[in-house]
Amino acid sequence: MTEVKINTEMIKLDSFLKWASIATMGTEAKFYIQEGQIKVNGSIELQRGKKLYKGDIVEFEGKSYKII
């Protein structure tokens, strides 16, 4: 599991995907989310604006990213 440090209390899912270098652009992040390729805490997440907090786990292509 990769740990990704954020500098704020909360980050939106699409911004997190860019911050963690999962997506290079917002349109790429949007595509991954709309296609159901992103899981947050074990559930498929379809909301780009989903608020993520420290301790949340994002999964993409078999890799896990924990927000710290």
Image (cartoon, grey):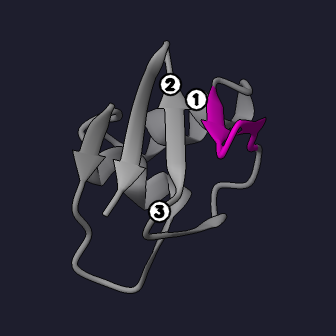
Report the span colored magenta: 38-45
Looking at the rendered structure, the kind of residue marked 2 is Phe
Answer whether residue 2 is magenta in the image.
no
Task: State the image coordinates of residue 26 (x, y, percent, origin top left).
Answer: 42, 47
Q: Which quadrant of the figure contains the C terminus?
A: bottom left
Say which of marks 3 and 1 sits in front.
3
Distance from disc 3 to disc 1, alpha carbons, whole Å, reads: 22 Å
Q: Which residue is mark 3?
A: 55
In percent of the image, x 72 and y 34: which residue is there?
Answer: 34
- Which residue is denoted by mark 2 in the rendering? 60
Callout 1–callout 2 Cβ contact below 8 Å: yes
Q: CA distance from mark 3 to mark 2?
A: 16 Å
Position above or below: 9 against 61 = below
Give the residue pinned by disc 1: 32
The answer to whether the residues at label 3 and label 1 have Cβ atoms under 8 Å apart is no
Where is residue 3 shown, x and y percent of the image?
26, 46
- Name the dominant secondary structure of the magenta segment: strand
31, 2: nearer the viewer:
2
Which residue occupies the foreground of this view, 43 or 37? 43
- Say which element carries label 3: loop
Residue 37 relative to residue 13: left or right: right
Local SS, label 2: strand
Which quarter of the picture shows residue 22?
top left
Which quadrant is the N terminus positioned in? top left
